[in-house]
Amino acid sequence: MKLPTLPSGLRFLQLNSTSQVAYCGIAVHAGTRNETPDQQGLAHFCEHLAFKGTNRRSARKIINDIEGVGGELNAFTNKEDTVFYCVVQQQYLQRAIDVLCDIVFNSQYPQHEVEKEREVVCDEIESYEDTPSELIYDEFENLLFPGHPLGHNILGNSQQVRSYTSDDARRFTQQWYRPENCVLFVSGSEKGVRGSEKGVKGTIDLQGEVTSPSLPLDSSLPLDSSLPAVTIRERGTHQAHVMMGTRAFSAADERRWALYLLNNILGGPSMNSRLNLSLRERHGLVYSVDSTMTCYSDTGLWAVYFGCDPHDTDRCRRLVRNELDRLMQHPLTATFLRNAKRQLQGQLAIACENREQFTIDFARTFLHTGHGRSLNDIMAHIERLTADDLLSVAQQLFSPEHITTLIYQ
């Protein structure tokens, strides 16, 4: 791994690879959390608009420069970052880097494109609102982080999106899409990236001023006692959709490793997760049930999601509660803990074979922490966990008074 910093302040993260395919991108330290109340959805909207033309390329040329050589160009927006990325053959890597730098740092956000794209984004919002199994995740975060940008929907709302102009997009990106606020990442061969540093120097225009993001949350307690225990939304859905969870640990908190393993034991992707065995295999009450954890820079969240027949909601909640109580009351046996570690480590090793996702995740970690994290490092953290570590975290997070529940019915 190499990490020079270019004269503009742009950090250049290089991961060596012998593959004929190169992955590259620019991770911007700006997302939903950086929006003011009158900017909700603007970070995601700017991500869309970045592809609509620069002072060197039209929207069509941006697409053709990459897709014309068989490559792929895409982007996504999160709560704390926005990532633009590209996949090409090695011989087209410098072209891909040039296109990425151009759209991130030189996009023009023409008003006629703004007017077209806002309808595309509004259609995306309406489609999302028609999918309760996805919408519930956003509303649940809003319950956990009330009045804070971390609780806001990434897509925003149609009324605000339809009000945004070219000037709004330029103001937001001039503030946040700055070289010193970004990481350019490349996974390719030494030969493929040679000269790339020099190639990006002339594409970056320094303007505006980076300001501090939203004030950090106080995550010293897992859950504020003022939050509602149960919230029910009448949505007229065929299924009941349920989330149960709490605030959890930040990306800098060492306790997150124990929660990482607990989360996999409870509701990870494998069919032998405790919640899947209980709710689906033994009782036949759900098609799918899973648990998730998210670590932000200064806080985090953990939650269980399931969908079931409305008549089975209370029974499913009791079964989830039973599994949480087991983890709070009984330390894992040495054999179970060893097997749980081995399973998670195996899943991670296989996941790292997806080079595109691994490269993006590595770059995002570096963007937020100033260092990457190798697979061996992650494996070592998991290996060091003890039964007492997991018991302590379960007792901190899973007690009934810390759990917030959201139900769509």
Image (spheres, grey):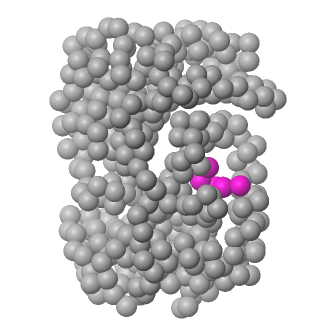
What quarter of the picture does the N terminus occupy? bottom left
Please indicate whether residue 202 sits to the left or right of residue 313 in the image.
Answer: left
Residue furthest toward the front? 226
The stretch of residues the image draws in magenta is: 153-157
Q: Residue 232 vs residue 276: left or right?
A: right
Give the x, y percent position of residue 27: 41, 65
Where residue 352 sits in the image (x, y, percent)?
Answer: 33, 47
State the count of labels: 0
Q: Can the viewer see residue 277 in this picture?
A: no
Q: Nearer the viewer, residue 312 or 171?
A: 171
- Residue at screen point 51% across, 22% down: 403
130 versus 213 height, above or below: above
Residue 256 picture quarter: top left
Residue 151 inside the magenta-drawn segment: no
Q: Which quadrant: the C terminus?
A: top right
Q: Residue at x 37, y 69 (%)?
A: 182
**Residue ID at (73%, 29%):** 233
In the rendered image, the vertical position of residue 194 relative to residue 340, given as above or below: below
Q: Is residue 173 left or right of residue 131?
A: left
Q: Nearer the viewer, residue 167 or 59?
A: 167
Q: Main secondary structure of the magenta part?
A: loop
Task: Place residue 270 in its image quadrant.
Answer: top left
Q: Residue at x 24, y 65 (%)?
A: 16
Tell me if I can see residue 402 in this picture: yes
Q: Is residue 145 above or below residue 214?
A: above
Q: Could you tell me residue 310's position as x and y percent?
A: 74, 18
Which of the two residues, 350 or 149, is positioned nearer the viewer here? 149
